[in-house]
Amino acid sequence: MTLAPAAAQAHGWDGTRFAASARLAVRRTIGPLLFLLLWHTASTLGWVDPRFVPSPVTVLQTLQDWMFGQPGTTTYSGTWFTHTANSAYRVFGGFAAAALVGVVLGCLIGWFRPVADLIDPIIQMMRPIPITSWVPFAVIFFGIRDASAFFLIALGAFFPIVVNTAAGVAGTPKLLVRAARMLGIRAYMILPRVVLPSAMPFIFTGLRLGIGLAWVLVIVAEMMAVKSGLGFVMWDAYYFLRLDIIIGAMLSVGVLGFLSDLVIQLAGRWVMRWSRGL
Amino acid sequence: MKSAVVPQPQPQSRARIVMRSLTKRFTDIARQEVLTALDGIDLEIGGTEFLTILGPSGCGKTTLLNIVAGFEHASSGEVLLDGEPIHGPGPDRGVVFQEYALFPWLSVEQNVEFGLRERGVPRAERRERVRQQINSVGLRGFERRYPQELSGGMRQRVALARVLVNDPKILLMDEPFAALDAQTRTIMQQELLNVWSAERRTAIFITHNIEEAILLGDRVVVLTARPGRIKEMVDVSLPRPRDVTSTDFNKTRRRVGTLLEDEVQAAFSAVQGEINAGG
C-alpha cells in the first residue's frame, strides 16, 4: 500500500488494492519466467546437451503425449493417468494410516507420562534412520507390491505427525485443563474436548510435513519396490535416457504435492476457523 | 464427577467455607529450600457474603483461592466446604481467572454451554439457561463470536457467564479485572455487583487493589507478605451502592492502605534482600 504511487491511490481503496495485487502477481511471475527462458536458451543454443537437458518445449510435448497420446505409439504414450493414479493411491493410503496412528499415538505420548517414557525413546531412535534403509525389509516382507509402498510411506509420514502431535498435546495450557475440570468435565473427556482442539495447530503442521514426505517416499518406493507409478516411470526412463520423461514426472509430483498440501491447509483453516483474523 | 450428581441444595445456593490453620508449603527444588506460601490461615465465610482478599504480590492470595477451588491441596490444616473436605475442582465452585481461560476454539455461546454440556444437561434446558445467562451479562448479539474477537472486558463477561450458568454455591475470582484498563475495570466492577446483587451467593475475590477490595467486599482480609498470614479483617459496613469519593469510603481506604503499606514494604525488602544475597 505504501508503495502505491499517488495516481493509483487516487482511485480509492479498491483501485489501490487491485493495482497492488496486480503488481504482486507480476513480481512473482518474473522469477519463474526468467528461469524458463534461461533453461530454453541453454538447451536450444546448445550450452547444454539437449539430450540430457531437454528444453521446456520438448518437456511439454512429452507430457502431452504421455498424458493424451495414443497408447502404443511410444512406451509411455497415454499412460500418465494410470501411473499417477497408482502413485496418488499409495500416497493417500500410506498417509491416512500414518495420520491415524500418528495422531492417536501422539496424543497418548503427549498426555500420559508412562506412555511417553515407554514409547518416546523408540520413536526418537528410529526417527533419524533413513526410510530407504527399510526398503529391503519392505520387499522381503511385503514383496514387490503396493503393500511395500504403503509401508514405507506410512512409516516415513508417521514420524513428523507423531512428534508434532505429542508436542502440541504436551503443550496444552494447564489453565484450560483447570477451567474444564472446574466446569465439571468427566476426566476421560479432557483429552477429546480440551487437549485435542488445543493441539490442532501442531497436528496440522505434522500432517503437512507428513504429506510432503509421503510424496518423496512414494517415488523412492516405486523406484525400488513396486513396478508402477511415477517413481517407477522415472527409474524406467532413466534406463532409456528419456530425461524429458523424468522432468515431466518431476513436474507432475511437484504439482500433485503442492495440491495435496493445499487441501490439508484448507482443511486446517476450516477446523481452526476460530483463529481467523489472528 | 461426583458433585454433578449431587442435587444442588436450593436454587439460591450458598456455601460455608471453613479454613482451620491452613498452611501451604512449596519445595523449591532448584534452591533446595521450602517456601511457606500460607501460614496458619483461619477463616470462615459463607451465606451471601462477598469477601475480598487483599495482599502484596507473592503473598499466597492465589494459592489460597486455588486450594478452595480444588486445584491445589493444603500442606496441613483443613478446608471444609459445607463440612466436607475438598477433593478437586467442581462446578459448585465457579472460578474466574485473571487470564480468562476461555476455550479459544469455542464461540461465546459454546464456552458458556461447556459445563452444562459436559455434565449431560439436556439440550433444551441447556439452551435456555445459556440464553438467559448471556443476556444477564450483556453479551447478547455476541453469541457466535470467538474469544479472539472480543475485548478483555467482554472476555471476562464470558468467563463470568460460563461459571454462573452452573449455579455455583460459591464464586471464586482471582484478580479478574487486573488485566483491564481503568475504565473497563470500573464498568466490570459495577456489573459484577449487579449480577451478584440479583442472585446473591458466596464470593471470594482476590485483588491487590485497595479501592477494588473496599468497593466490592462486605469484609476485606488483609494478608501479610510471605509467608501469608491474616494481618487483619476489616468489615466494610458502607451501604451499597458505594461512592468511592465519599468521606467514609476514604476513611476505610486510608485504614486499609496503612495496613497494606507495611506489607508491601516488607515484600519489597524481602525481594531486595534476595537480590543482594544472590548478587
Image: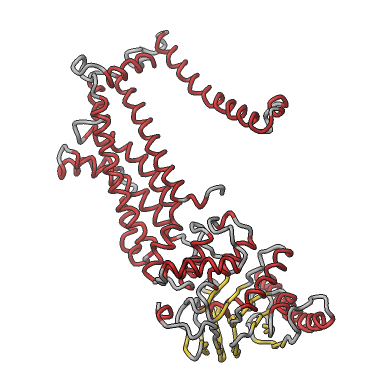
Q: Quadrant of residue A76?
A: top left
Q: Number of callouts in the render?
A: 0
Residue A28: image x %, image y %? 53, 27
Q: Is residue B111 above or below residue A164?
A: below
B64 shown above or below A158: below
Residue visible at 18% across and 31% down?
A227
Q: Residue at x 69, y 33 (%)?
A: A2
Residue B122 placement: quadrant: bottom left
Residue A243, image quadrant: top left
Residue farthest top in this picture: A45
Residue B119: percent from the left, percent from the top? 41, 72
In this rendering, would A114 be left or right of B28?
A: left
Instruction: Name the one closer to the observer, B170 or B88.
Output: B170
Q: Is residue A60 left or right of residue B92?
A: left
Q: Residue at x 51, y 87 (%)?
A: B81
Residue B224, can we see it?
A: yes
Vertical comparison of A254 with B86: above or below: above
Which corner quadrant holds the N terminus of chain A? top right
Of B166 and A154, the residue lying toward us: B166
Q: Residue at 52% across / 51% down in the picture?
A: A275
